[in-house]
Image (cartoon, helix red, strand yellow):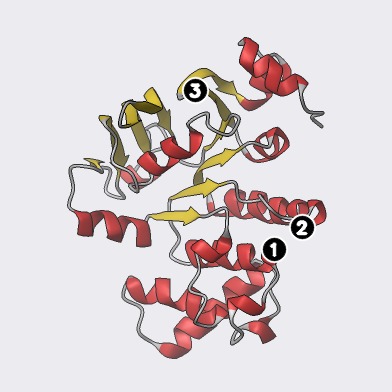
């Protein structure tokens, strides 16, 4: 079996990860393994440290302590904060994708929908205009955007369409690991449901590994295999998603679960 197909090796290994904003704690001593095809949900109230953790994991915010080890397509492990900045940028264009809560933060608003998808392809060497446009059309179709909108600017799209376009932009290079920060935040309930169905289908179809930060436990239940619950910068409970949500052990998790009605 080739290293890329070896499901027994973690794709991402996190050891003792901490980040401090001066004397203020962002996250403390977080550790876990993420395996190929696995979806990990990180939940907690605002200020719990989940967004800080996601930034550290996705090479946006260097940790104060600890390491993030990523296993590349050849099976070799790399500490993402020990490689060069240019190597990290290339990683974010190829093997990784980042879906921002506000899709405007993850899109180029001054270029067309097709160009938003095509730019990421060009960043990894694609140069044939016809092939790029054809692939962009294919991905617009996958994320349920009318192909007639390929030359329209994202600013003319609804919030839900912008989020689906951001997803297409991220997935066109067939990444192995996706980071999502509240991907359904700010969307109407009906739009959220459509987006979640789309995400769940694409994650399964492409065999993606995903780390998703959300305050919405229903989103976590629908998308994630495992769950980590954060409070005041620390992981207070972790386990299989249904196990954590149906039989929470930590008082904070019990409080979170009791505050919402889960399906």
Where disc 2 sits, the SS reads helix
Where disc 3 sits, the SS reads loop
Rounded to the nearest whole Å, what is the CA distance between mark 1 and mark 2? 6 Å
Residue at 70% over, 14% down: 247
**Which of the marked residues, 1 or 3, is nearer the chain's N terminus?**
1
In the image, is 40 to the left or to the right of 158? left
Q: Nearer the viewer, residue 7 or 168?
A: 168
Question: Label 2 crowding class (10 Å Cα cut-off): few <14, some 14-19, many 20+?
Answer: some
Q: Nearer the viewer, residue 23 or 194?
A: 23
Q: Identify the residue under disc 1.
A: 160
Where disc 1 sits, the SS reads helix
Residue at 43% over, 65% down: 173
Question: Can you tell which of label 2 and label 3 is closer to the viewer?
Answer: 3
Q: Dots 1 and 2: beta carbons under 8 Å?
A: yes
Residue at 48% over, 73% down: 108
- Give x and y (percent) for residue 117: 49, 74
Q: Identify the residue under disc 3.
A: 232
Question: Can you tell which of label 1 and label 3 is closer to the viewer?
Answer: 3
Q: Nearer the viewer, residue 176 or 108?
A: 108
Residue 191 got which mark? 2
Q: Is residue 27 above or below residue 113?
A: above
Rounded to the nearest whole Å, what is the CA distance between mark 2 and mark 3? 31 Å
Task: Indicate the quadrant containing the N terminus: top left, top right, bottom left or bottom right.
Answer: top left
């Amino acid at each position: 079996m080739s290293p890329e197909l070896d499901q027994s090796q973690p794709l991402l290994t996190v050891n003792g990860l901490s980040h401090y904003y001066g004397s203020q704690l962002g996250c403390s001593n977080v550790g876990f393994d993420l395996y190929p095809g696995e979806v990990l949900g990180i939940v907690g109230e605002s200020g719990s440290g989940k967004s800080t953790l996601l930034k550290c994991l996705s090479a946006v915010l260097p940790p104060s302590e600890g390491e993030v080890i990523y296993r590349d397509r050849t099976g070799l492990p790399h500490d993402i904060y020990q490689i060069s900045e240019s190597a990290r940028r290339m990683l974010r264009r190829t093997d990784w994708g980042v879906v921002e809560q506000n899709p405007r933060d993850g899109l180029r608003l001054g270029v067309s929908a097709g160009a938003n998808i095509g730019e990421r392809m060009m960043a990894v060497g694609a140069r044939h205009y016809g092939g790029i446009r054809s692939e962009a059309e294919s991905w617009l179709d996958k994320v349920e955007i009318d192909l007639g909108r390929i030359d329209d600017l994202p600013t003319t799209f609804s919030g839900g369409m912008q989020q689906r376009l951001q997803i297409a932009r991220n997935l066109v290079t067939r990444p192995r690991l996706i980071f999502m920060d509240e991907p359904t935040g700010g969307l109407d309930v009906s739009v959220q449901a459509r987006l979640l169905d789309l995400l769940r289908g694409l994650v399964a179809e492409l065999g993606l590994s995903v780390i998703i930060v959300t305050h919405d436990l229903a989103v976590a239940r629908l998308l994630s295999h495992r769950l980590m619950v954060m409070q005041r910068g620390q992981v207070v409970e972790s386990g299989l998603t249904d196990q954590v949500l149906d039989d929470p052990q930590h008082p904070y998790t019990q409080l979170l679960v009791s505050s919402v009605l889960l399906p």
